[in-house]
Image (tube, rainbow, N blue to C red):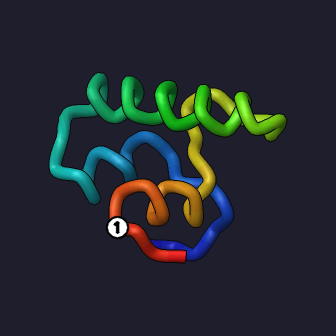
C-alpha cells in the first residue's frame, strides 16, 4: 500500500475484499459525503484519511 493522498478503486476493492464495481459504488457514496461538506472530489478516487475514518474510525 502506497501512502499517496488518494486511494484508487482497485486499492479500495482489495482492502475491503469487494468487487471493483462495488468499490466504485462505495467511492461514489463517500465522495458525495465529502462534496456535501464543500470538498472537491475526484471521480474514482477517495481521500485515504477520510476512507480510514469512515471504515476504521481512525483519525
* Category of crowding for the residue at label 1, using alpha-carbon neighbours closer than 10 angstroms: few (below 14), some (14–19), many (at least 20): few
Where does label 1 land, which residue? 56
Could you say where residue 25 lies in the image, as x and y percent from the top left?
Answer: 38, 24
Apparent side of residue 36 relative to residue 12 in the rendered image (left or right): right
Could you say where residue 32 lies in the image, as x and y percent from the top left?
Answer: 60, 26
> Which quadrant of the structure image shows residue 38?
top right
Residue shown at the point (47%, 34%) measured from the top left: 27
| 37 w.r.t. 54: above or below | above
Could you say where residue 12 lies in the image, as x and y percent from the top left?
Answer: 37, 49
Question: Foreground: 47 or 59?
Answer: 59
Q: Quadrant of the N terminus?
A: bottom left
Question: Foreground: 28 or 45?
Answer: 28
Question: Foreground: 9 or 55?
Answer: 55
| 6 w.r.t. 19: above or below | below
Could you say where residue 34 lies in the image, as x and y percent from the top left?
Answer: 67, 38
Apparent side of residue 28 relative to residue 55 in the rendered image (left or right): right
Residue shown at the point (71%, 29%) measured from the top left: 36
Amino acid at each position: 500500500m502506497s501512502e499517496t493522498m488518494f486511494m484508487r478503486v482497485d486499492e479500495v476493492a482489495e482492502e475491503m475484499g469487494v468487487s471493483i464495481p462495488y468499490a466504485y459504488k462505495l467511492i461514489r457514496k463517500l465522495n458525495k459525503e465529502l462534496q456535501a461538506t464543500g470538498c472537491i472530489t475526484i471521480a474514482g478516487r477517495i481521500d485515504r484519511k477520510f476512507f480510514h475514518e469512515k471504515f476504521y474510525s481512525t483519525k
